Amino acid sequence: MQLSKEDVLAKANKACKNTLMETLEIEVVDFGDNFLVAKMPVNSRVYQPDGVLHGGATAALAESVGSFASHIFIDTEKFFVRGIEITANHLKSVTEGFVYAKATFLHRGRTTQLLDIRVTDDADNLISICRLSTISLPKKKS
């Protein structure tokens, strides 16, 4: 039985409970065959000292959405996903509203995955460009 889009989004967001994603209020909002989108509010909880979005919070959003994208396309009964490298280029500052991270696969191999993650603001301005490499590793058999 294939889950509906709403069921997949609800399952992804339920997995965020008691994690960094919940702390940062990251919410998975959309996905398709080759992408996943999450959003995060921009407020004082994610500011750097001068009142703009912290690059580390942006990187956490990017790694979260990229890892989730890899996760939903593997057999989670047999494998788990870990991020192995992330890069982020921050292009514009944000002080309010939401930022949206869209992870798109550049490579979706059996073992490694490479994702392009574009972070935009409410006006669809490009805020950051990130790249994430993930690895799918076998779960130990009990």
Image: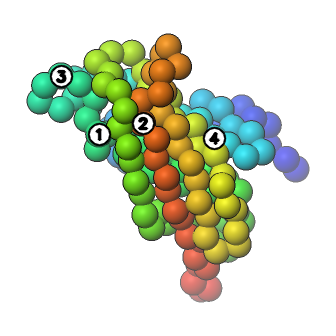
Residue carrying label 2: 128
Mark in the foreground, 1 or 4: 1
Position above or below: 112 against 54: below
Distance from disc 3 to disc 2, alpha carbons, whole Å, reads 17 Å
Badge 3 or badge 2: first in the primary sequence: 3
Residue carrying label 3: 51
Badge 4 or badge 3: first in the primary sequence: 4
Which disc number belongs to residue 134? none
Q: Secondary structure at mark 3?
A: loop
Q: Please provide percent x and percent y for residue 72.
A: 67, 53
Mark in the foreground, 1 or 2: 2
How packed mark 1 is, by other alpha carbons closer than 10 Å (few <14, some 14-19, many 20 or more), is some
Q: Secondary structure at mark 4?
A: strand
Distance from disc 1 to disc 2, alpha carbons, whole Å, reads 9 Å
The part of the image, by quadrant, that contains residue 90 is top left
Residue carrying label 1: 55
Q: Please provide percent x and percent y for residue 47.
A: 22, 29
Question: Which quadrant is the C terminus positioned in?
Answer: bottom right
What is the residue that sits farthest to the left in this orientation? 49
